[in-house]
């Protein structure tokens, strides 16, 4: 499994970054998958036997710049892979731009970082490697707020890195 993670990171970040990775990048916490029709996607996965899906409609989302928008979001575990599906409902955000450019697909690999301090340190470290934050987005679901910081690794792969 570690070999697969390292190979995927090699694809995502480019070979020159592999030796500079922090430990938390060796494990993927989840995939963020942007979809045009979340109800259709969830129904299709349920037809394949993946019935434990938690969905939320019209979820309030706030970007780092203070822009507020709404998304539909669903969470599932597909055979050990945690997946977050997002359907954007407006056309002024990172999710819309990805969908417009790539159609349905995986926007980001998500790597969990334990503390705010560790996140700040990691962002500074990545900036030194010329990988800059694109956007920080807070998604409010009942009982929790999810915070994602998307890093600009798109030039080195086909996805954004998310911490």
Image: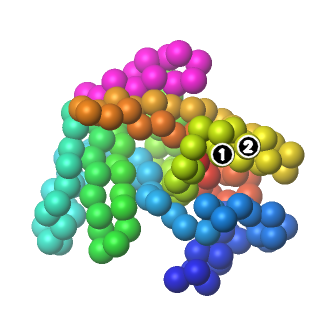
Colour pattern of the rendering: rainbow
Q: Main secondary structure of the magenta part?
A: strand
Q: How many marks?
A: 2
The residue depicted at 14 percent of the width and 63 percent of the height is 51
**71 and 4: which is toward the camera:** 4
Residue at image mark 2: 121
Q: Which residues are magenta?
A: 58-69
| Position above or below: 136 against 24 | above
Q: Look at the numbered discs 1 and 2 and tell me whether their residues touch, using CB distance below 8 Å.
A: yes
Going 54% across and 49% down the picture, which residue do you hit?
114
Q: Position of residue 106 (x, y in %)?
A: 47, 56
Mark 1 = which residue? 118
Tell me which residue sits at (65%, 45%) in the image. 118
As drawn, 163 above or below 79: above
Q: Quadrant location of residue 65? A: top right
Marks 1 and 2, how far apart in space?
Answer: 5 Å
Above or below, 135 against 3 in this view is: above
Q: In front here: 60 or 100?
A: 60
Residue 59, numbered label: none
Q: Secondary structure at mark 2?
A: helix
């Amino acid at each position: 499994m570690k070999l697969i993670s390292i190979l995927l990171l090699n694809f995502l970040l480019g070979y020159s970054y592999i030796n500079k990775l922090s430990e938390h990048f060796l494990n993927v916490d989840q995939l963020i998958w942007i979809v045009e029709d979340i109800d259709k996607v969830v129904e299709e996965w349920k037809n394949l036997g993946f019935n434990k899906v938690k969905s939320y409609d019209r979820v309030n989302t706030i970007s780092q710049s203070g822009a507020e928008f709404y998304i539909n979001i669903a969470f599932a575990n597909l055979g050990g892979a945690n997946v977050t599906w997002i359907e954007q409902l407006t056309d002024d955000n990172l999710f819309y731009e990805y969908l417009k450019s790539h159609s349905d697909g995986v926007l980001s690999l998500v790597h969990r970082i334990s503390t705010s301090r560790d996140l700040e340190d990691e962002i500074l470290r990545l900036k030194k490697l010329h990988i800059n934050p694109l956007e920080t987005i807070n998604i409010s679901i009942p009982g929790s707020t999810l915070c994602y910081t998307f890093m600009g690794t798109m030039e080195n792969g086909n996805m954004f890195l998310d911490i």
